[in-house]
Image (tube, rainbow, N blue to C red):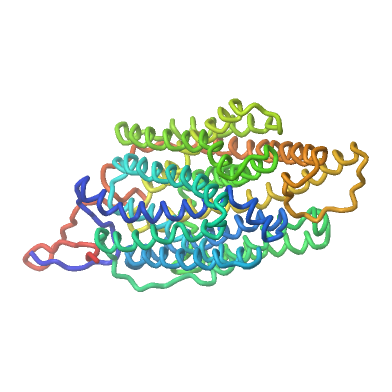
Amino acid sequence: MTQVTAPARATTVNMTHRQILEALSGLLLGMFVAILSGTVVANALPRIITELHGSQSAYTWVVTSTLLATTATTPLWGKLADLTSKKVLVQVALAVFVLGSVLAGLSQSTGQLIACRVLQGVGAGGLTALAQVIMATMIAPRERGRYSGYLGAVMAVGTIGGPLVGGVIVDTSWLGWRWCFYVGVPFAILALVVLQKTLNLPVVKRKVKIDWWGATLITAAVSLLLIWVSLAGNTYDWLSWQSTIMVGGALLLGAAAVRVENRASEPLIPPRLFRNRTITLSVLASIAVGIGMFGASVFLGQYFQISRGVSPTMSGLMTLPMILGLLVSSTVVGRLITSTGRWKRYLVAGSALLTVGFALMGTVRVDTPYWRLAVFMALVGIGVGMTMQNLVLAVQNTVGAHELGAASSVVAFFRSLGGAVGVSALGALLGHNVTRYLADGLAALGIPTTGNSGTLPDVHALPAPIRAVVESAYGHGAGDIFLAAAPFGLIALIAVLFIKEVPLLRHTGGPIADEVEQESTVAAGGGTAVIRTGIRD
């Protein structure tokens, strides 16, 4: 029997549970670092922006810049994963992430910090895309729910630990906020070492051809749209010639990107994937979940610290109900999906809980009892835990193994896009409404408003009457953005209701490519040739 190498087809990786856990250890550690870096800043941002004399817009862009870079590069990483070594790629992503973290810690202005956060986002985009792709390469869909639960647990631990660690760092005078960016570096280096020792995956030998034009046009279109959302209503009116130019430009760039993607031999986002109803609806739901999840939750730390006047450490503790809900739901639901092979019911329930949770959080004000807010946050966390990972799982169950990278990254791309748009749009809404509420509150005190510098206030340094106005304004503004996020949860619910459930496969691969994870035999002269699809790193 002669072995030959065929063009890219499905790959079979037969691994025991222990081998999978060993291979995933470095990957999960890398994901932990990426999540920790994002969440460790959440409760530190009010202090960081205040010390760097930044504005509400800068606060928003410190988050948005990372999400934008993650959004733009996720499909690029996913495409590279279909073309070359996934092990090398995830190590490169970690290295980029470490570099961005170190430079962010050295930043002297909000502009420098935003630029370094872009570099962090590039690395995070690789880790986000490659984690899903590598899991899909090693684990059959039916078993993937179990390991997705592990991934969800790691995400929850990183999300829980991040705000707490960030709060402690900011509240410790001899450390300071810069250590929020340095704290993940040792973990990232450890992840690099573990990945080198434990991760061995098939590599498909193909000629790498990257759709750079598509990547450039998509990034430009998204960036222009986000810049418009963040500036409209403050720098210029929503209905103005500036808005017309920027929105028109974004639409033209988007149309050019679609044209390029349709003609590219290796498109960054393959248009033909959207002929599959499951992928299209999952993408729509992911956008909605991203808007709600990132857009609203990123401002929770600001609400607790400015509106309720608590420390960064206490702010982290007060968000625990949402994170614990995410931890429990992602772990339990992952195991349930593995045991039954059914996943749609959990997407429907999760989307419904997300919608209800955000609607209830829309009632939040400065004096809302904490126990009530904790229940609302728990509902949101449970909803996110039931939907986020399982939307990717539903998509992976419908594509061939040679397109796992592209398909997985498409879902992650649009989820990050939704998050970037959500943070930018809801941040603009928060800034606009807070300015209005402040003007009304100060007018009631007989204090004239001569303009707003846009900088975040240090509530502890304000006189008691003015402090009360500021706390009330930010509390009301937070409720507004949570309420604005609720309709997007409803959109996600409607989308998943129309997804046709296909029981999870016990092999990797899927119906698009009509691939079966078995050795194919072909007549080869007088014998049989076993066609394999790759070699190991």
Identify the residue at image location x=83%, y=58%: 240
User: Where residue 203 sits in the image (x, y, percent)?
Assistant: 28, 65
Quarter assignment of residue 130: bottom left
Residue 136 position, x and y percent, is 33, 51
Residue at (37%, 38%) from the top-left corner?
502
Above or below, comparing residue 115 to residue 483 in the picture: below
- Residue 301, image x, y percentages: 61, 44
Please state, as top left, top right, bottom left or bottom right, where the N terminus lies in the image.
Answer: bottom left
Q: Is residue 372 left or right of residue 335?
A: right
Quadrant in the picture for residue 57: bottom right
Task: Determine which quarter of the picture holds residue 434.
Answer: top right
Q: Quadrant of the C terminus?
A: bottom left
Which residue: 39% across, 33% down? 333
- The image shows residue 160 at horizontal and vertical percentages of 47, 42
- 429 left or right of 390? right
Q: Is residue 330 above or below residue 101?
A: above
* Nearer-the-camera pick, 62 or 132: 62
- Tell me: 291 left or right of 272: right
Count of marks placed on residues: 0
Residue closest to the eye, 537 or 263? 537
